[in-house]
Amino acid sequence: MIPANFDYAAPESLDEAISTLSQGGDDAKLLAGGHSLLPLMKLRLAAPSLLVSLGKVPGLSGIERSNGGFSIGAMTRHAEIADAEELGVTAHAASLIADQQVRNRGTIGGSIAHGDSAGDLPTVFLAAEGTVTAQGPNGERQIQATEMFKSFLTTAVGPDEVVTSVYMPALDGYGWGYEKFVRRSEDWAMVGVCALVKSNGGTCEDVRVALTHMGATPLRASATEEALRGQSLSPESIAQAAEQAAEGTNPPGDVNATPDYKKHLARVLTKRALMAATGG
Amino acid sequence: MAESVRVNVTVNGESRSSEVEPRLLLVHYLRDTLGLTGTHIGCDTSNCGACTVLMDGESVKSCTVLAVQADGAKVQTIEGMAPAGNGALHPIQEAFWEHHGLQCGYCTPGMIMAAADLLKRNPNPTEEEVRHGLEGNLCRCTGYHNIVKAVMAAAESMRSGEGVPA
Ligand SMILES: Cc1cc2nc3c(=O)[nH]c(=O)nc-3n(C[C@H](O)[C@H](O)[C@H](O)COP(=O)(O)OP(=O)(O)OC[C@H]3O[C@@H](n4cnc5c(N)ncnc54)[C@H](O)[C@@H]3O)c2cc1C
Ligand code: FES
Ligand code: FES
């Protein structure tokens, strides 16, 4: 399988990348790790006229502690994130992505800019309420997680913008869990659940639950969150709240799972993720 | 027609320089342009791992990397694993031979390259860690059992320094 023809540019600075991209017209696309884009191009589901590679742009990779959180360069590979234990649930979710070869190439910036609802890092980003920094011809702006995922494979990142870094709050005081259900370990999630819980003397002070592959975008399980916030945390209260994890979702069926089965998985995995997040 | 692009790649220690179409996949560059047909193609979906090579020391699926993305990189393929000249094999190759880690052999080059990355990251893996480390590589023949045995044995011989590390 060979992609359709395209032109290729490998700029050596961020400014040059942005100008090449914006002059490249509608069909120009950025290329990061290529592990979402190239498979689509090989199947001819995407046929950009120009690829602008970020591979030679300096300064887009690495993990830095900043402002009560972590600033992760957009080109930081999943493998490096998986090895950075201080990143907590982000590192854990990255370690569950596909296989070593894919983790060696795929990037956090590409994963979030692409916004695949079956992706693991977009879900964690949504639960953690992270922020993306994007730079375009008109300068730099921040995009909040709640504003990021618009519809199927459509994010708030503009066609001439480059995501330069992803900020993840450190979430001190939160317990976490990420549960991913697959038939084979290299697969995309049939369903995945990220849970973050802050407890104060056994009471749930804050809770965030986000779902992978339960709709066109990653989703927050707000009914579960509301049911648990302010309540005392016990296996019973968690089980009860988890029963509402699929509320309001309309997951697409596929060869692996019917919509009903996915809803079932969302409930079961939410319970497990919440238990993990509360040390159970 | 897209404009062709010059790539400079070091493949198995040798500098190569070619004009390529941007859409040329690294696996086709290795197989068709350079004639290194030890790297196989087993799928259209980036799943099987038969095309695994090392790029700057890390395992990648060369069917999902453009040749132009390898510009400036060092690529190692199965042909570059055995030490040059004396007919000896790399310890991972030796272990696959010893432990019958292959039947038809189609998946083997990719398995060996993935195992090289795995053993670099974790020189003393458990059996479970080996299975996880090879989850990006499919084998339709062996049932994986002897592949895992071979990688465990290779790990031991590389740790004890009997073999030649990559
Ligand atoms: C076999 C296989 C299995 C996989 N399994 C999983 C899985 O289980 N879980 C999972 O989460 N992912 C999985 N992935 C996807 C993988 O994580 C991708 O690497 C990731 O989704 C996209 O990152 P990338 O760097 O490869 O982006 P690319 O493919 O290079 O780009 C994707 C899109 O984002 C845009 N883009 C990229 N970088 C930027 C940027 N900095 N700024 C603005 N736009 C940008 C591109 O223009 C493109 O439209 C799998 C991929 C493969 C091939
Ligand atoms: S040929 Fe199957 S993963 Fe590359
Ligand atoms: S030995 Fe035949 S595919 Fe693995």
Image (cartoon, rainbow, N blue to C red):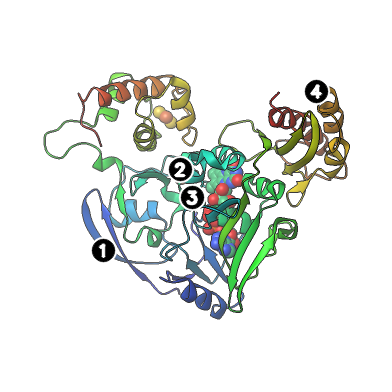
Q: Which residue is mark 4?
A: A235
The span from disc 3 to disc 2 (Cα, nearest Å) is 11 Å
The span from disc 1 to disc 2 (Cα, nearest Å) is 25 Å
Which circle, 1 or 3, is nearer the viewer?
3
The answer to whether the residues at label 1 and label 2 have Cβ atoms under 8 Å apart is no
Q: Which residue is mark 2?
A: A101
Q: Amino acid at mark 1?
A: Ser
The span from disc 4 to disc 3 (Cα, nearest Å) is 36 Å
Q: Amino acid at mark 3?
A: Arg
The answer to whether the residues at label 1 and label 3 have Cβ atoms under 8 Å apart is no
Which circle, 4 or 3, is nearer the viewer?
4
Q: Amino acid at mark 2?
A: Gln
Q: As displayed, is residue A211 above or below residue B99?
A: below
- Looking at the rendered image, the quarter that the N terminus of chain B falls into is bottom left
Q: Which residue is mark 3?
A: A77
If you read the primary sequence from the N terminus, does the residue marked by circle 4 or circle 3 appear first? Answer: 3
Q: Which residue is mark 1?
A: B17
Which circle, 3 or 2, is nearer the viewer?
3
Question: Closer to the camera, B138 or A225?
Answer: A225
Chain for numbered disc 1: B
User: Which disc is residue B5 wearing?
Assistant: none
